[in-house]
Amino acid sequence: MPTIDMIKSSDTMLLSAKHRKAKLVRDYVVKYAVAAVLLCVVLLPVVFMLCRSVMTYEEASGITMHLFPRTFDLSNYKIILDYLKQLGNTLLVVAINAFFIPFTACLTAFPFARAKFIGKKAAFAVILSTVMVPSSVLLIPTYTMYATVGITGKLVSLWIQAFFGGGALNIFLVIQFMRTLPKELDEAALIDGANLFRIFFKIIFPLVFNVFLYICINTVIALWMDFQGPLIYLGTGNESSFTLALKFYIDYTNDSYLSDHYNVMMAMVVCMSLPPVVIFLIFQKRMIGGIKIGGLKD
């Protein structure tokens, strides 16, 4: 038969378990409450943008401020039809950079990760040292160089750098990824008579496709939202070579219609914001997990 001490011990353990469960519930409530408040703060500008984009001109420009529209006007989104030429220019720049930046990064990283040659460590140190140079310092030399060869004001100024290495950080990322691949793959291919180019394109490149896609997605998002580059290198050119962001900025600052019609302006902002959001939602697992796994699976 259970003694009094055993009964008291059992009651104490039961009470302790109830206290732990109550504390756990309180912790979850506090955490989710704080997360909900922060989420509302972060999403408030997005909700404001979406609501303004479907308001009428009178409602969006009225003295009385309110968040949700009383009348929906989807015709505001027709403004994107006025920028189809600039949209095509933006897609062209993004497409060229999205492929050649990760591809040239993989091509440059291959000898550093898989081959031995004189000056390898020194060359790698020079490449990594460029990371410490602020990008703003290079703007004037780059613009002067482009102006000297006559490509300022042309779309080529926005994608020509994609053919020259892909960036030090991307090269470093690919090198670290390639080093996880066993050297026996290269040796077996060399024994079978394959040269280095064949080894790269047939063996190594397919195995580093995860990191290639990771760099590709980041490049697309970064260049789609890039405004500084087009403003500096295309600002003196013809409007037919403008990107979407640059053309809309110039129209907004010079056109009284756009600067006054906040509903139309917000509709354009929504259109410009959708592609990176969609790309992130589709490829988020690839972006987060793409570089966490090795080139080979168990």
Image (cartoon, grey):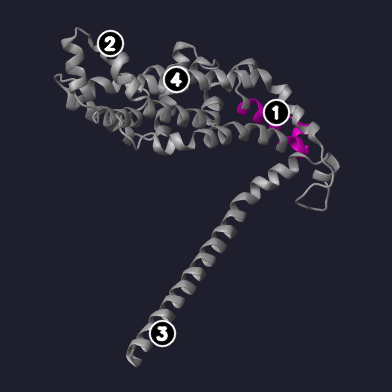
**Kind of residue at disc 3:** Asp
Residue 196 at least partly seen: yes
User: Where is 172 relative to 193, above or below?
Assistant: below
Q: Position of residue 111 (x, y in %)?
A: 23, 20
Residue 236, can we see it? no
Find disc 4 in the rendering and name its residue: 99
Mark 2, residue position: 198
Q: Residue furthest front?
A: 1
Image location of residue 176, percent across then percent down: 27, 32
Q: Which residues are magenta?
A: 245-265
Residue 271 in picture, x, y percent from top left: 66, 32
| Mark linked to residue 11 | 3
Of mark 1 and mark 3, the one earlier in the sequence is 3
For marks 4 and 3, give the one nearer the viewer.
Answer: 3
Front tag of 4 and 2: 2
Amino acid at the residue labelled 1: Asp
Question: Which callout, 2 or 1, points at the residue further toward the start of the chain?
Answer: 2
| Circle 4 crowding by C-alpha within 10 Å: few under 14, some 14–19, many from 20 | many
